[in-house]
Image (spheres, rainbow, N blue to C red):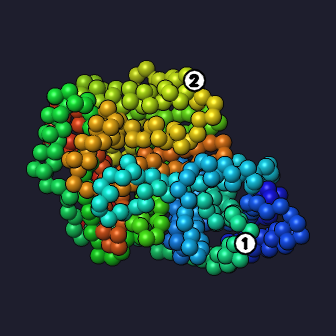
Amino acid sequence: MSLSPEITLEQTGVEAARDLRARLAEYVARLSKGTTPGYARFAAKIRQVDPLEWLESQEVIAKYYWRDREGTSERAGLLLPRFGLELPTATSGILRGCVDHAEGDDSLSAALSIRGFNSFPFVAGLHVGQPPIAPQFSFLLPDIELITVGGETWLTCLLQNSGEHEILSLGLAELVWDENIAASSFRMAERDEAQSRLQWAIAVNRAVAGIARGELEKVVLARKSTCRFAAPVSPWSLLKLLRTANPHAYIFGLDRKPFDPFIGASPEQLYRRVGRLIETEAVAGTRPRGKTTAEDDRYRDDLLHSSKDRREHELVVTGIAESLRPLVEKIDIQSDPNIVQLTNVQHLVVKISATLKPGISDDEILRALQPTPAVGGYPKQVAIDLIQSLEPFYRGPYAGPIGWISNDSAEFAVGIRSATIRENALTLYAGAGIVEGSDPDAEWDEIDQKFNTFTSIFTDK
């Protein structure tokens, strides 16, 4: 069954859900008369609804949010409860089978195409003895999705198994359309670190010693900082603040029970693919934003002319290029780095583009690129081993890939500037690249600047 060809007039959410239920029932009735079963996709245009407020109101087993870095589209998805449901862990193979059945109708924009939402850990299996804060892999194909693109909002549903049409119909009927959710503020009560400054300095100095011995050239060590609040933290309310404060970042959230919600505002693209064309970028080196234009320019120039940061950045470029070359026919690398300026910090960045060899899948791209030297180190495996020995916590999805895959395109961010949530505790993660000459105090301060993505939106005690 292809995408339903009817495009309805703009409706309320309640009206659209009722319309989709009727079209779903009609489709299933036709199946009983001999229509070939398959994935069925339905969409209805609705009045504008904030996807994050909508997510706040829904009670389901899993939900996610994604806003692209350009701020041109938002997607909020729901997975409904099923008896004995096992969420799939594969990526493009499952999705390709779905869209082969469901796509083919050009009456709806490609922006509404079926996408599987994916989240992966930094490295599968690290610290496996600790209680997991996230699944090793997530591949979520939404039953119901709210999509905002080009100033329009759509409610969509996907029937993945004709025998589950009653569950999907009930899910549509039980959607909540509460447009009066109060604005939230976050007043931090206390904050604690997983490591003291002394413990951090010992870890950094051990890494620098390994670099001096020639064991590796770079490793990214992370800190974990937990902020506690008087009341439970809503991931969707917090994401509303992050979305406003970070207009040029990927904004994402994943709440898959029983795991901790994972949210973030990442500036870094792992890769974007359209057909066989792939784009990625090397990001490294950090300076704060200045309080004045002159101060901002001084930080910018200092970063551009820092031999330590340029060396760190060159290792990221080298590592990404080495990972991509076996998968591509040609690769183009920007010759000199630019500066990307974000709300709280600025970084060195180099754009990289390539043409994939025929038949290369997103699974292969993810395995090759993750983790890049920007979040792991160089050489890759030596750095991963050192991270496991020096970091006293489980990274989980922090610095792992998060994004989406469709039949002919994909886009993933690197899950940095991110946090997990457990009741009233928000646990922040951020890292710094350790190379020859790294100073523990300077690296600690750099991570504090990255934590500002979150802490800058908190109110005073």
Q: Quadrant of residue 169?
A: bottom right
Residue drawn where x is 32% and y is 52% of the image: 126
Residue reaching furthest to the left: 198
Residue 243 numbered mark, or none = none
Q: Position of residue 161 (x, y in %)?
A: 70, 66
Residue reaching furthest to the top: 335
Which mark is first along the chain, 1 or 2?
1
Can you say whether 398 is above or below 133 in the image?
Answer: above
Q: Position of residue 402 (x, y in %)?
A: 48, 50
The kind of residue on which mark 2 rests is: Glu
Q: Is residue 180 left or right of residue 218?
A: right
* Residue 357 in view: yes
The quadrant of the image that shows the N terminus is bottom right
Can you say whether 361 is above or below 250 in the image?
Answer: above
Residue drawn where x is 29% and y is 30% of the image: 312
- The local secondary structure at tag 1 comes to helix
Q: Quadrant of residue 189?
A: bottom left
- The local secondary structure at tag 2 comes to strand
Can you say whether 350 is above or below 446 in the image?
Answer: above
The kind of residue on which mark 1 rests is: Gly
- Foreground of the two, 190 or 323: 323
Residue 163 numbered mark, or none = 1
Graded by Cα atoms within 10 Å as few (under 14), some (14 to 19) or many (20 or more), the crowding at tag 1 reads: few
Disc 2 from disc 1: Cα separation: 44 Å
Q: Quadrant of residue 411?
A: top right
Graded by Cα atoms within 10 Å as few (under 14), some (14 to 19) or many (20 or more), the crowding at tag 2 reads: few
Residue 329 numbered mark, or none = 2
The quadrant of the image that shows the C terminus is bottom left
- Foreground of the two, 366 or 50: 366
Q: Position of residue 240 (x, y in %)?
A: 46, 62
